[in-house]
Amino acid sequence: MLRHSTQRDDTGRQIPLYGPEGFDGMRRAGRLAAATLDFIAGHIRPGISTGALDRLCEGFMRDSGAVPATIGYRGYPCASCISVNHVVTHGIPSDEKLLAPGDILNIDVTPILDGWYGDSSRMYLVGEAVPVLARRLVEVTHEAMMAGITTIRPGATLGDLGHAIETVARRERFSVVRDFCGHGLGRVFHDAPQVVHCGRPGTGVVLEPGMIFTVEPMLNAGRAEVKVLSDGWTTVTRDRSLSAQFEHSVGVTETGVEIFTLPPAPSASSAVLAGLPV
Ligand code: MF3
Ligand code: CO
Ligand code: CO
């Protein structure tokens, strides 16, 4: 039976607490999300369409026994979100959108494996000639996500996590998007707690063993404001500045944190693409 914390998040919802079975299910779903993001790295090149990348991700997830959570989610049509350059999040893959040298892009996948949702995204660089600012934004966004994840342990707060992310972004004069948050997940896609990527230390939900949620900060090279295009999904920076995002699904353990969506067997090349320490 699913237990709940006595705490509620900012939206007033109860926060589920998972046991060993939940952690095991999330480990398997998370590993598959990571494997999908590893696999797709080998297909990123100038001239390929985001629609083609989406079909490759879908095939990989289905061949692994999973169902892509995003297809039909609130009417969303695809197996992944692919957000290029100034697209902040929820870019809809399309056969018309071709990658060009120097582009940066985020690919976000959520396979459902045996009922468990593994949600993760990474940034990829197209070709060798990616401008310094774009590379820097990608590196710092990964650093910000990991700084947030590093704060996670029983007794720490979601305010601590948000503050750590914001501190890294500010140091580099990048802005943190306020309009989208991380979220609880497990047997559902989007659950409590809401995970804001900024905050004040010591405030907000106090973390307890068994909480499972995503950390998925979006950083912009320019201002934080975003707008949603007329398709109802594609979200872009208002000032058309570049945007980057990374996402891990994590669980609070008795002593700290477990990252469910780390790559199963990190290869040097995918680590470089992902901005991870090699
Ligand atoms: N995977 C996204 C997240 O990180 C959600 C995408 S919902 C979709 O929460 F419908 F846009 F795919
Ligand atoms: Co998510
Ligand atoms: Co996601």
Image (cartoon, helix red, strand yellow):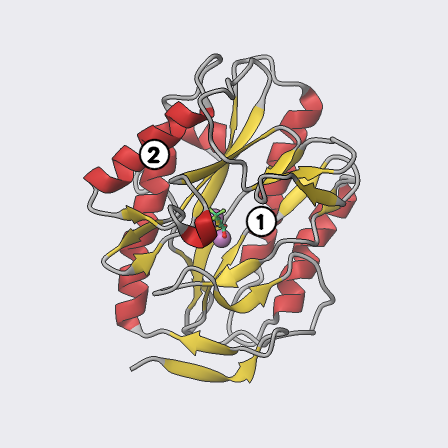
Q: Which mark is residue 1?
A: none
Which residue is tagged 1? Answer: 145
Q: Secondary structure at mark 1?
A: helix
Mark with earlier residue (2, 1): 2
User: From the image, which quarter does the N terminus lie in?
Assistant: bottom left
Residue at 69%, 48% (x, y): give it: 177
Give the camera-side residue of 69 and 255: 69
Q: Is residue 158 above or below residue 143?
A: below
Is the residue marked by circle 2 packed among few (<14), some (14-19), or many (20+) residues within 10 Å?
A: many
Displayed quadrant of residue 59: top left
* Residue 142 left/right relative to 222: left
Residue type pointed to by label 1: Met
* Residue 161 left/right relative to 210: right
Q: Is residue 123 above or below residue 167?
A: above
Q: Position of residue 97 (x, y in %)?
A: 51, 21
**Residue 269 shows up from this direction:** no
Some atom of ligand 1 lies within 8 Å of the CB belonging to the residue at label 2 = no
Q: Position of residue 164 (x, y in %)?
A: 67, 56
Residue at 65%, 39% (x, y): give it: 229
Which residue is tagged 2? Answer: 57
Q: Are marks 2 and 1 in contact (CB under 8 Å)?
A: no
Q: Secondary structure at mark 2?
A: helix
Residue type pointed to by label 2: Cys
Residue at mark 2 to residue at mark 1: CA–CA distance: 23 Å
Q: Is residue 34 above or below residue 133?
A: below
Residue at 59%, 56% (x, y): give it: 148
Q: Is residue 35 above or below residue 46?
A: below
Q: Nearer the viewer, mark 2 or mark 1?
A: 2
* Residue 72 left/right relative to 115: right
Give the camera-side residue of 96 and 120: 96
